[in-house]
Image (cartoon, rainbow, N blue to C red):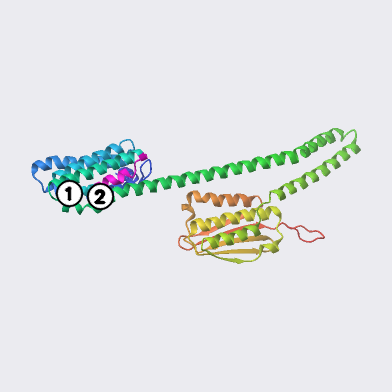
Amino acid sequence: MQNLLHALRRFITKRPPDGGPPIFFMLLWLVYILFPIFSIGEQSLVEQWVGFPLIILFIVSYVVGHLSRKWRLWAVLLHLCIIAYFSWRYDEDFMYMGFFTASMIGLLPKLRQVGIALTGVLLLFGFEVWHYEALDRMDALLDLIPAMLAVLLLPFVMFIGRRSKLLRTQLQLANDEISRLSKQEERQRISRELHDTLGHTLTMITLKSELAEKLIVQHPERAKQEIRDVQLTSRAALKQVRELVSGMNTVTLQDELSNAKRILAAAYITIKVQGDPASASLSPLIDNMLGMCLREAVTNVVKHSDARQCVIEWAMTPDQYRLAIRDNGVGCNLADKGPAHTGLRGMQERLNLVDGKLVFQSTKGTGSILTMIVPRVRSSSKKGEST
């Protein structure tokens, strides 16, 4: 029984394969089919034997048309025929059943199919006008003109909405692909620079180390010279690495703080900054990592928090740097974040490179606090502290 209920819940909450509202809403609208059922129930027994099977066929085609793209157009045409029969045989109010048909027309995948379906709707309206004009009951049909117009316009609204959603999805996919290609190109650039910059140097260190190993017994003085050359070469390699990192340092904490003020102001979020990172004299690597983390955190505030205020706090102690981003938004439970959790994981991975850590605190309805802590590296020298 429990498995049956679970399967039923999954069925009514899922969406059709090609988009559209959840199946639950499609089934919910069937409550309005009670009005045609009551109308047919007032007819003679002979009419009921014809009317009720057509109602059942109407409901089945409505469900199949929403779930199956292949049969959707045929379900629309069948609906129009049933509505035409009911309106001709019983009463013009059966034209209101066209709203069920209009929802399926809006889900048709091709513009050509939409054109065929709307042509059928116009033929239905023309048939009804001719029929009621012949019966001299045009006044009754005129009352249905607003409903007819709604049946014609609803498919256009749904079709345009689905097309807009599709275009937004395609745009997002294109932006993701551009981002992926940009990252790939950046990796290849860094790989080329590392190869060109350090390849020759590391090869030289390897060769001189092997030579020193061979000379250490028979020619110790020469081996010592080779070791000194290795030391000089390794220092040169370290300098090259620092220059390479400095060249890659396109993101700084101070620049991202200025960008955060503009981004939050554009999103109508009040920003308050406490502390000044400019006084910290950060190393290029830490400056880069904190800047990228701040960019990601501010983006999350704008996209997900629904906050009206954001506070960025900067503080340092003799042992660590501390950057906190606090908002008064809707908050969340970390277990419910799903794909959004990857942003936090990316920030933690960046901070791992500088032995930092990330602390995320949030509950629904109370906002969020994101804290980044990076240790300060200190060394004793005549120049004092270095970071």
SS assignment for the magenta stretch, majority? helix
Question: Which mark is on residue 92?
Answer: 1
Quick one: 71 or 193, which is closer to the camera? 71
Q: Measuring 63% from the left and 50% from the top, which residue is drawn there?
A: 352
Ranked by sequence position, the earlier of labels 1 and 2 is 1
Q: Is residue 210 above or below residue 299?
A: above
Q: Is there any visible trace of residue 55 in the rendered image?
A: no
Label 2, secondary structure: give it. helix
Judge whether residue 94 is colored magenta: no
Q: CA distance from mark 1 to mark 2?
A: 12 Å
Check disc 1 and report its element: helix, strand or loop. helix
Residue pointed to by mark 2: 148
Residue 163, given in percent of the width and then of the height, sits at: 41, 45
Residue sitting at 49 percent across and 59 percent down? 305
Q: Position of residue 51 (x, y in %)?
A: 15, 42
Q: Is residue 230 shown to the viewer in this render? A: yes
**Residue 205: x, y in percent?**
80, 38
Q: Answer with left or right where residue 69 lies relative to residue 201.
A: left
Residue beneath the point at 78% across and 47% down:
239
Give the extent of the magenta segment: 98-111
Horizontal arrangement in the rendering, residue 103 relative to residue 82 (left or right): right
Residue 104 lies within the magenta run: yes
Amino acid type, label 2: Met
Residue 279 spot, x, y in % from top left: 70, 64
